Image: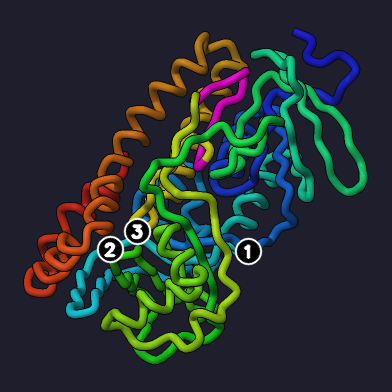
Amino acid sequence: MTIGAGLPSYDVVVAGAGPAGAMTARELARRGVRVLLVDRAEFPRTKVCGCCLNPRALAALGRTGLGELTARLRAVPLTGIELATCHRRAAVDHDLGVAVSRESFDAALVDAAVAAGAEFQPRTSARLIVGSSPGCSRLRLNGEGRSFEVAARFVVSATGLADSLFAAGSRTSASPKAKLGAGAIVAHPPAGFQPGRIYMACGREGYVGLVVLEDGRLDLAAALNPVAVREAGGIGALAASILGKSRFPAVPRVDALPWKGTALLTRSPDRLVESGVLRVGDSAGYVEPFTGEGMAWALTGGEALATILAESISGLEDSPAARWSHVYRTRIARRQLVCRAASRALRTPWMTRTLVRCLEYRPSLARPLLSVMHKAP
């Protein structure tokens, strides 16, 4: 079949080079698929949140031959989580995976995709051209002072929460109670924050997580009520208030940090597959994570989608869209239900206080939940 006569043609174009997009591109390239990976950013680049890789994410790396990647990046093993409210503080010891900066991890995944044979174009945005159809999609790429079209048999959207591939803008809908995501970095952690622990300060208006990265910096990731953000006078002010009321050590000048926000976190697309575009990662739907689940969904989703597309291109799969919808529903969407329940509990003050109080005296109560959330498929 001729795809886009006269245009540069690929079997698959992947828009977005975060963990989901880079994993999809690498696994396709490993199978001999001609794939183009594009991203509007230059790599390495900073990224809000997502610095924790839980055991499910590490299992996905292991299955795809990237098991040594986190060790090479000097990722910090995570041995437990500590939760705090204004009156209580609880510590739970459990294998939670590793912590590694997104600058290092995302760039390493892109390098792995290129090494496998994927073509990568950074500083390049992609838009689906109106009139594209399944099996013969056209995209307009803009970057570095030039604009051109390419054609592809399949297009994968891994463009994140905003889902920017479509010219009309985002095709995702946020939950009415969705929180705003935000992140910041502290160059030197205050005394009391140790490597290998996830710290989570919980308040009525949201929560702030903290973890020490492989280079010694302190990563702050928050999920905040957007109304409370406006009332507090900004992300930094609300994060400072939540941390200040918790029983964690003080983090100086939290309100003055250069916080970066995201779109509302809990959201879902109108369709998982639309106009020949298959969504993966945050573009496919996102639920407010707890301890690294978002990265696991991205990596396992990219791994599974690449298998489906490669089999379709080789003639072994007749209905890739239907199969991807089924796989996504059974392997990812069902697991997101656990995070939905956890986020509901954390946004209810009395439930949060009760949870932390119970864990203060019986930390083992959290282990079954963490085991379910992190169990490999």
Q: Position of residue 256 (x, y in %)?
A: 56, 81
State the residue at coordinates (73%, 48%).
40
User: Is residue 287 on the magenta stretch?
Assistant: no
- Disc number at residue 46? 1
Looking at the image, is 9 positioned above or below residue 360?
above
- Disc number at residue 95? 2
Task: Give the quadrant of the C terminus.
Answer: top left
Q: CA distance from mark 3 to mark 1?
A: 19 Å
State the residue at coordinates (52%, 12%).
316
Task: Give the quadrant of the N terminus.
Answer: top right
Q: Is residue 166 left or right of residue 211?
A: right
Q: Quadrant of residue 84?
A: bottom left
Amino acid on which disc 1 is placed: Thr
- Badge 3: residue crowd in 10 Å (few <14, some 14–19, many ≥20): many
Whichever of labels 1 and 2 marks the residue nearer the N terminus, that label is 1
Q: Which residue is mark 3?
A: 291
Tags 1 and 2 in contact by the CB under 8 Å rule?
no
**Helix, strand, or loop for circle 2?**
strand
Q: Residue furthest front?
A: 231
Amino acid on which disc 2 is placed: Asp
**Helix, strand, or loop for circle 3?**
loop
Q: CA distance from mark 2 to mark 3?
A: 11 Å
Q: Which stretch is magenta?
A: 272-282
**Helix, strand, or loop for circle 1?**
loop
